[in-house]
Amino acid sequence: MKKTQPETFTLDRLASPVGEVLLVTDAEGAVRAFDFVDYEARMRKLLTRHYGEVVLTPGRAPETVRAAIGAYFGGDATALDTVVVKTGGTDFQRSVWAALRTIPAGETWSYGQLAGAIGKPSAVRAVGLANGANPVGVIVPCHRVVGANGTLTGYAGGLERKRWLLAHEKAEAGTEQGAFALD
Amino acid sequence: MKKTQPETFTLDRLASPVGEVLLVTDAEGAVRAFDFVDYEARMRKLLTRHYGEVVLTPGRAPETVRAAIGAYFGGDATALDTVVVKTGGTDFQRSVWAALRTIPAGETWSYGQLAGAIGKPSAVRAVGLANGANPVGVIVPCHRVVGANGTLTGYAGGLERKRWLLAHEKAEAGTEQGAFALD
DNA sequence: CCCTGTCTCGCGGTTTTCGGACATGACGGC
DNA sequence: GCCGTCATGTCCGAAAACCGCGAGACAGGG
């Protein structure tokens, strides 16, 4: 019903070891959303929530972004660190998402740790929710957050993928450290 | 909290026989809001409701618009008919506001008539509500609607102004018809 | 009788409020 | 150890409240 004029973004599709992924970038080349193809509906819902009506025109994302994603899935777990992302959401959510990007590849934090990192140690549950509302999967590594006891608890792209991503990143870090656990 | 980028409009201030008025126009020169200076808070609230965060930068509205308003207050009751307005709001509200502009100057309709005109004869009260939510006072002549028994019932800018506007328009029409009532 | 003023009640869109559901974890009782 | 409890931010749906009304019922006065 609102009449705010629609925003237009570019929608690219890439292949990955865990299935086709969707990559939404804006005119400046910043990433606005990233998700697995089988969760396109969810992604669009988030975009709509943040920006109002949104138009996605199929097209190629900037080469630097495509290259970074390729490198990441190819084995360079830190390749995504320099990718520029831009999100909507509330102040709280943005602070959570910003904190997520400070978690080093190959490492995991608990929801409590994350809550502490943004200065609201008791907002643990809210952090979980904000995590789930992350529109830029993988690049903003919400998958690096697990339960305090080590359980994976949940992932918007499916727990299988969360497991895969963590193993992938750990394996990469592991090649330098010499050892890592498979399960 | 939403992060939809703020919209920017121009805010002009004009003198009128019923006090200073505020005139908000967009980059295309369409009128987005119009209200009396002592109801600025209400106007801003409506703008925010419709467009999210709004920035009003002081400046001059297009001369055509300024001229039309001057002519109207100067005595030409139909001078506002050609002014281009643009509003947010729900479908229902916009249909009400569109119908308002079809009421000839110097004439008044009842809320029931107006409801009938938009094809919802029983939505009388809702029409009253939509009327009160009109962001573009005077130009979209919500003041030309009165109770079925002729009472003025209400006006966002104060009943005094409603009375004045109606008398003003009727006087203008009256110069052709030869007679009109003062009270 | 007729006219008028007051009161009651139904009408319908919009806004507000409220109560849940969650990708958790720390704590106190058993 | 297992279980209930509570804190915390956000979204979503449902329900209620809000009114710039108007028709109909009724009581008084001319």
Image (cartoon, coloured by chain):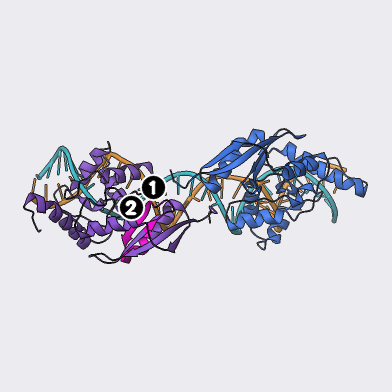
Chain colours: A purple, B blue, C cyan, D orange
Q: Foreground: B130 or B55?
A: B55
Q: Is residue A101 magenta?
A: no
Chain ID of residue with mark 2: A
- Can residue B148 be seen? no
- Find residue A89 and name its label: 1
- Magenta span of residues: A24-43
Is residue A1 depicted above or below B25 in this figure? below
Name which quarter of the figure residue B58 lies in: top right
Mark 2 burial class by Cα count in 10 Å: few <14, some 14-19, many 20+: some
- Find residue B62 and name its label: none
Chain ID of residue with mark 1: A
Q: Residue at x 19, y 57 (%)?
A: A75
Q: Amino acid at mark 1?
A: Gly
Q: Quadrant of the C terminus of chain A?
A: bottom left
Q: Is residue A26 magenta?
A: yes
Residue underneath mark 2: A133
Q: Foreground: A32 or B49?
A: A32
Closer to the N terminus: mark 2 or mark 1? Answer: 1
Q: Amino acid at mark 2?
A: Ala
- Relative image position of residue A159 (x, y in whole percent): 21, 60
Q: Helix, strand or loop at disc 2?
A: loop
**Could you tell whether B173 is left or right of A30 in the image?**
right
**Could you tell whether B18 is left or right of A76 in the image?**
right
- Can residue A70 be seen? yes
Would you say the residues marked 2 and 1 are in contact, meaning their CB atoms lie under 8 Å apart?
A: yes
Name which quarter of the figure residue B14 lies in: top right
Q: Helix, strand or loop at disc 1?
A: loop
Q: Residue at x 15, y 54 (%)?
A: A172
- Relative image position of residue A136 (x, y in whole percent): 32, 54
- Relative image position of residue B85 (x, y in whole percent): 67, 50
- Alpha-carbon span between mark 2 and mark 1: 9 Å
Q: Are marks 2 and 1 on the same chain?
A: yes
